[in-house]
C-alpha cells in the first residue's frame, strides 16, 4: 500500500487535500520561529513528508492530526537550529592541499550574527507561544482565539464561524488577548533585544 493510500485508510482524509489546507497555516506558524518565509515553507513541506512516512506512530487519542504535524515541524526547526549551533571547524594543524585558505572553513562573524539572530527569533517565538498556551483558565477565551489566530493563522472570519461568535467580539477578544500577552512577555523580549541570549 502506498503512503497516500495508507494515510487515507488511517485518517479517512485525502493527503493532498489535507496538505493543501494546512500547509499555508503551518508555514506562517513556522515563519514566526524562523523569521524567513521561504525557510518556513521548506520546514512545513518536510514536516508533512515526515508525518506521512511515520504515520504509524500517530495516536489520534493524544492529538489531532494537524497538531501532530505542527509538533513534527517545530521539532525539525529546533533540531536544525541545534545542528547549526555546532559550527564546522577545521583544526589549524590540518594539512590542506593546494592554496586553500583554512579561514574559508571557519565561521565568519556574519555567520555568527545570523545564527545568534536565528536563535533569538526562535526563543522569542517560544516565549510568546508558551505564554499563550499557559494563560490561566479565567483567560481561556483569549487563549482559544489567540491560538487560532497567532498559531494556526486562521482568519478572523474563520474563527468567528468556528466558535459561532460574532466577528466584532472575536476582534475584541484577540486585541485584548494580545495586550495580555504583550504585558506578560515584553520585559523578556526587551531583555533579549538588549542583551541577546546568555
Image (spheres, rainbow, N blue to C red):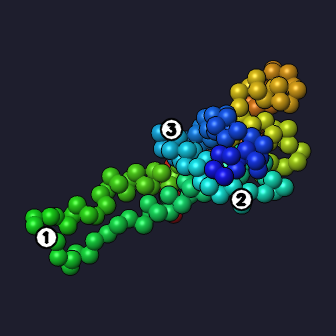
Is there any visible trace of residue 189 in the rendered image?
no
**In this figure, which residue is indicated by the disc labeled 2?**
56
Q: Quadrant of residue 12?
A: top right
x and y percentages locating residue 59 in the rendered image = 78, 57
List the residue tagged with mark 1: 97
In-image side of 120 versus 60 (left or right): left
Q: Left or right: where does residue 107 sit relative to residue 44?
A: left
Image location (x, y in percent) of residue 92: 22, 75
Q: Measure the alpha-carbon separation of dots 3 and 2.
A: 30 Å
Foreground disc of the pair 3, 1: 1
- Mark 3 Cα-neighbour bin, 10 Å: few <14, some 14–19, many ≥20: some
SS for dot 2 = helix
Pointer 3 residue? 37
Mark before the other along the chain sequence, 1 or 2: 2
At x 35%, y 66%, the residue is 88
Badge 3 marks a residue whose secondary structure is helix
Q: Nearer the viewer, residue 50 or 171?
A: 50
* Distance between mark 1 and mark 2 Cα atoms: 49 Å
Amino acid at each position: 500500500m502506498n503512503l497516500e493510500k495508507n494515510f487515507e485508510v488511517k485518517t479517512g482524509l485525502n493527503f493532498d487535500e489535507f496538505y493543501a489546507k494546512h500547509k499555508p497555516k503551518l508555514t506562517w506558524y513556522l515563519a514566526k520561529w524562523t523569521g524567513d518565509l521561504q525557510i518556513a515553507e521548506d520546514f512545513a513541506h518536510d514536516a508533512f513528508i515526515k508525518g506521512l512516512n511515520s504515520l504509524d506512530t500517530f495516536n489520534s487519542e493524544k492529538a489531532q492530526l494537524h497538531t501532530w504535524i505542527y509538533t513534527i515541524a517545530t521539532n525539525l526547526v529546533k533540531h536544525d537550529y541545534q545542528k547549526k549551533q555546532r559550527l564546522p571547524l577545521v583544526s589549524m594543524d590540518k594539512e590542506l592541499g593546494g592554496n586553500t585558505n583554512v579561514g574559508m572553513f571557519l565561521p565568519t562573524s556574519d555567520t555568527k550574527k545570523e545564527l545568534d539572530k536565528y536563535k533569538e527569533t526562535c526563543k522569542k517565538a517560544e516565549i510568546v507561544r508558551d505564554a499563550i498556551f499557559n494563560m490561566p483558565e479565567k483567560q481561556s477565551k483569549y487563549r482559544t482565539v489567540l491560538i487560532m489566530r497567532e498559531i494556526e493563522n486562521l482568519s478572523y472570519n474563520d474563527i468567528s464561524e468556528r466558535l459561532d461568535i460574532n466577528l466584532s467580539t472575536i476582534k475584541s477578544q484577540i486585541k485584548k488577548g494580545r495586550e495580555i500577552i504583550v504585558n506578560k512577555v515584553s520585559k523578556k523580549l526587551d531583555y533579549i533585544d538588549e542583551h541577546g541570549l546568555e
